[in-house]
Image (cartoon, coloured by chain):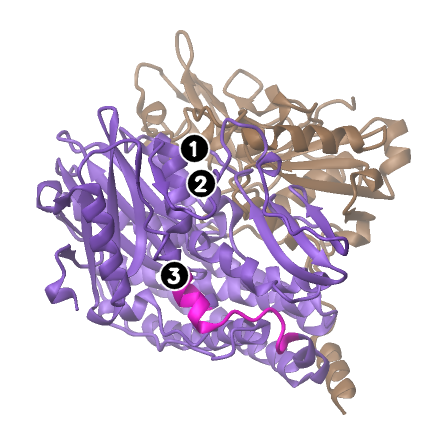
Chain colours: A brown, B purple
Amino acid sequence: MFVIDTLTHRLERGCETMSYPDGPAPDLPDRHGGALRVDAAKCPGGCRECVSVCPTEAIAPQAGKGISLDLGRCLFCSECVHACPHGAITHTGDHRMAVRHREDLILGAPGMEEVRLAGALDEKLRRLLGRSLRLRQVSAGGDGSAEADLNVLGTIGWDIGRFGIQFVASPRHADGLVVTGPVSENMVLALRKTYDAMPDPKIVIAVGACAISGGPFAANGEVMKGAAAIVPVDLYIPGWPPHPLTILDGLLRILGKLDAGGVTAAPS
Amino acid sequence: MSSTSPFALLANGTALPWADVPEWPVEEFVRKTAVELGRGARLCAWFGVPEGDATRLVAVIAFDSDNTLAVARSAPGSGAYPALTATEPQAHLFEREVWEQHGLMPEGHPWLKPVRATGCGAPAQLEFFRVDGGEIHEVSVGPVHAGVIEPGHFRFQCAGEEVLHLEIGLGYQHRGIESALVGGPHRATVSQVEAASGDSTIGHATAYASVMEALAGAEAPLRAQWLRAIALEMERLANHTGDLGALANDVAFLPTASACGKIRGDFLNLTALLCGNRFGRGLVRPGGCCHDLEPGRLSQLAGRLGTALAEVERASAWLWDSPSVRSRFEGTGPVFAKQAAELGMVGPAARACGIVRDVRYDHPAGWYRLAQVPVSVWPDGDVFARARVRWLETQRSGQFLKDQLAAGVDGDIRDKTAKPQGDMLAAALVEGWRGEVCHVALTNPNGDFRRYKIVDPSFHNWTGLALALRGQAISDFPICNKSFNLSYCGFDL
């Protein structure tokens, strides 16, 4: 009877996969806050309240007035949001923050109040990868958290298999390389070999502050300040670690599976 | 036992002046440490402190049955000294580490090689123990593995399917956390500690905060200690549930694998409800906690917790009811209690060998002084036992959370912490979900870190995994590995 019991339990649980992206995206936790927005116009300059509380020196004062905030270094601790007396740095509540170019994560300049969201891959790549994207993941000094939330995408709640996305064991089978961690010195060779073993055309996705900029380890001589030092990165997904929803948005975004919303970069 | 120890005693989460730490010439220090370990103490940390061109050794040991820690140090020395490992195997990685970091040579160490292979190429290029013979073959795996998992190198010596010996080469994840802490705390320090092992953020952050508070002679507000205990148990629930699902997956029992993968996320989301981050980043800080559980949030948390606990109860029941799962788990990858004790194993892996060893019980600090969790033990030392202990702990942590959520205390959640005092040594143990997280800090006269030692539970347990594989089929490596689920980055730091 055991088999029947198991099947009954399974049926009772029903379908647990979320309706997103056909339905609305699940809410981020209220204390998460989502992406950041920098309104340079509200920053009169002269104070360094936000600069001094940032754990990763992601915020730099600009000549004259205003600041620049690098979302690629950001650990999303919210200290700057609380510290700014002028409300120049605010949470947007938006889970979307994946970008195609490193500079698209630098906030603060006029027109760059928020991140310039990633657009889709070019037509040729999209035709090749759009319905079947096989990813090889390499943790290079990652702390296990971004890896855990990548694994979560494979569970029944998220089920990235329905988009044709799958993590594979061999780089020979992979179309994309997903890098986590600041790239420790001891992983440089393995990361490069994994990349070289993948057939062309291939893309590289840096997941998390560590893989984008080195995160809190950027000043340590034992790491390379992120994946771009070793392999060419095509998609940057900020967060520490990024919420699974942010990662999924990034993946669907480059595959052109989401309706354009927010400011997006031109296809490249 | 501790009352007759020549070591200086200190309770978990307290500090003492560096000058009060007894000091002996290095040979005598090693001998005295061996005596203490020989009569039941356990090595929590063993590390070097640079003193000019020379190095002092420091030992932090635990008398579990007396609920006390003890510390001693050697006179500054260089060159060679008689290895503690010769009589006490639990020191074997510590002595290799000190040799790698400071050049102190433990004479008589049976297998002296770098622990993390920094600065001399990849760890896989070092010498590995080798079994010779015409029928023997060697299997080399990693650093990059098949799944979404951290890197490490495994070298198997096999006769056919049977593993005669496994040697594990780590160091790929080394990010230089300990050396970056010297002169600190710096702005990025607490974040680096939170990421020492990302799935144990609360465990490591709580140990760090305890050390900082002890150095400042302060204690976090009681409500913050309550919040830390709640977060720590939620971290345990999430990881144990994930491990039960992953173990089910490794024996192709998909109902539990699918359900637990989802429920694990539900537990992570409870942590995110508390602090915004699924791993608890930004919650625990020296002096207290940064987020509170106001009444509405508390009742939401309690409600969702009850649902998730009921679901994990049911999904696990399928696992235990399945004869095919039991037959794959039972007798696979055994570690004997004697081996576990000699290696100084900790956490669920040690408790699965029948050893009653749990920081929450042996060295209660923070909220655990006021509320206790029963210690979960299973006798057999195999994959089944490690899975079973996780399941028992899931039940008991769940009950603890239900009870404690209803029994919170009012008050502030954060005090402004004073600066650490100069020339002090502080030690804190926290029972993370993998086992004992140990942090030891030594300050210079200005109150900055002169040395900061982190011992992740994985440091004690990786050798246990290697022993579990002996005599097993190599195809059982994945399930054995998963049953330990040790941290690569926590080991590599």
The x and y percentages for residue A161 are 79, 53
Q: What residue lies at 56% left-to-right and 38% top-to-bottom? A: B172
Name the chain under label 3: B
State if disc 1 and disc 2 touch (CB < 8 Å): yes
The x and y percentages for residue A165 are 79, 47
Q: In the rendered structure, which disc, 3 or 1, sits on the residue that comes first in sequence?
A: 1
- Do marks 2 and 1 both belong to one polypeptide chain? yes
Q: Is residue B252 above or below residue B198?
A: below
How many tags in the picture?
3
Frontmost of labels 3 and 2 is 3
Secondary element under disc 3, as helix, strand or loop, is: loop
On residue B493, which mark appears? 2
State if disc 2 and disc 3 touch (CB < 8 Å): no
Q: In the rendered structure, which disc, 2 or 1, sits on the residue that comes first in sequence?
A: 1
Which residue carries the number 3 mark? B344
The picture quadrant where one finds residue B128 is top right
- Quadrant containing the C terminus of chain B is top left
- B222 or A230: which is nearer to us? A230
The residue range painted magenta reads B329-348
Looking at numbered disc 3 in the image, what kind of residue is underneath it?
Gly
Looking at numbered disc 1 in the image, what kind of residue is underneath it?
Gly
- Quadrant containing the N terminus of chain B is bottom left
Name the chain under label 2: B
On residue B176, which mark appears? 1
The answer to whether residue B414 is visible is no
- B176 or B198: which is nearer to us? B176
Q: What residue lies at 86% left-to-right and 44% top-to-bottom? A: A132
Question: A178 left or right of B93?
Answer: right
